Image (spheres, rainbow, N blue to C red):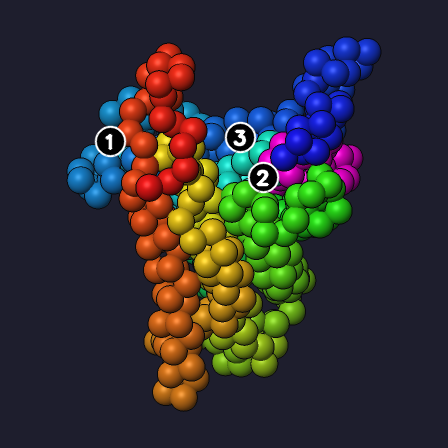
Amino acid sequence: MTNTAQRASHAPAGPEHHPHLPFWRRYIFSTDHKVVGIQYGITALVFLFIGYGLMALMRWQLAYPGQPIPVFGKWLLWALGPDMAGQGIMSPDLYNSFGAMHGTIMVFLAVVPLAAGAFGNYLVPLQIGAPDMAFPKLNMASYWVYFLGGVVMLISFFIPGGAAKSGWTSYSPLATITDAAYLINGQSLWLIGMVLLITSSLLGSVNIITTIIQLRAEGMGWLRLPFLVWAQLVTAFLLLLAFPPLEAAGIMQLVDNLFGSSFFLPTGLVVGGQPLDVSGGGSPLLWQHLFWFLAHPEVYVLILPALGIVAEIIANNTRKPIFGYKSLVYSAMAIGFISFLVWAHHMYLTGMGTRISTFFQTTTMMISIPSVIILTSLMLSLWGGRSGSTRRCFSRSRSCRCSGSAG
Ligand SMILES: [Cu+2]
């Protein structure tokens, strides 16, 4: 830890160490990991609030269907036009687009950037004693590509036809035939936004992995890494390996939507009694497989950094190391690995057959084992913790028992 402290004290971290740089280089297009982390955090919280707002409006519609929404109804009418919110009443199309965009915003624009982008960027270099991320410029690019993806998603509310309406899962063929009357519709912008967001998470995850492998302070062996760093490392591998298939699939669905290909459109598609003029031969199930190959590991992208944070908080407040550190680390790795083998548990109703279903049921039950080990370790870590707030402990000076060992 001494080495860590020495290394960290030489680190040019923080914008205060770059007083010669102009404001926009220090705080806007910054390459400093702390500033990028804070940028991620603030942007993600703004999106979290927007996502919450969409949900609140949907709940209002469910509670008082067909009635004008107080206050916000007028704003929606003004911003989105009478097709979407005539007389301040939420139209079915608007409800659908709020549903799709609420899910997308919460998962891809709020929680992932908060868990990996904000906490990962800010804390990982500090906790491993690195001066900054391995690729600071890549870090800046990662944030701004994320920001651009968010802007594209938000713009989609205001184009003719409105935002995407096919759920956050964007299943084909629904996602291709909805709003097909508009050449560039909300769904196309959703796909472009997703390609940008996945590109951003790729840049970020390469950076976090390289930083943890290459920039650990001397003496910071693998099994001395704080658990949060391990959680961020496994998360980064999930982002690196699980997200690209949906980036490819997103581009394929975009080509389906814009240029009339049919990667995900079956032969003989009939919509509203009318046969649809598509060449067919594609597979809607292929989309579901590619989507859930991302979206199940996604669940662990959301929870692993949070478990890492919980572990740090428990260790600090009980004033002793967390219980079963090694089993936590190995469980996190096991979760990371098994999370690639469970995706089709979202697809039991697709008729994929009992044999495949059984495989995915088994792996899904298996992944609960490392999950329970982590939760049990965290709970047992509370055992024998020193009570009392930090302030009381410090004020008692010598008589304080906070530095004693566990038990
Ligand atoms: Cu799942």
Q: Which residue is at the far right?
A: 20
Q: Residue at x 41, y 67 (%)?
A: 367
Task: Find numbered disc 3 in the image and state the secondary structure of the residue it sits on.
Answer: helix
Type of the residue with mark 3: Gly
Circle 1 or circle 2, nearest the eye: 2
Q: Nearer the viewer, residue 135 or 355?
A: 135
Q: Residue at x 63, y 35 (%)?
A: 1
Q: What range is drawn magenta here? A: 126-150
Type of the residue with mark 1: Pro
Image quadrant where residue 393 sits: top left
Image quadrant where residue 77 sits: top left
> Quick check: 348 left or right of 225?
left
Q: Residue at x 23, y 36 (%)?
A: 60
Sooner in the amino-acid sequence: mark 1 or mark 2: 1
Residue 98 appearing in the image: no
Q: What residue does disc 2 label?
A: 120
Task: Find numbered disc 1 in the image and state the secondary structure of the residue it sits on.
Answer: loop
Residue 118 appearing in the image: yes
Q: What residue does disc 1 label?
A: 68
Q: Residue at x 63, y 52 (%)?
A: 222
C-alpha gap between disc 1 and disc 3:
34 Å
Magenta stretch: helix, strand or loop mostly: helix
Q: How many marks?
A: 3
Type of the residue with mark 2: Gly
Is disc 3 in contact with disc 2, using a CB cutoff of under 8 Å?
A: no
C-alpha gap between disc 3 and disc 2:
10 Å
Tell me, for residue 41, which label it has, or none.
3
User: Magenta span has 71?
Assistant: no
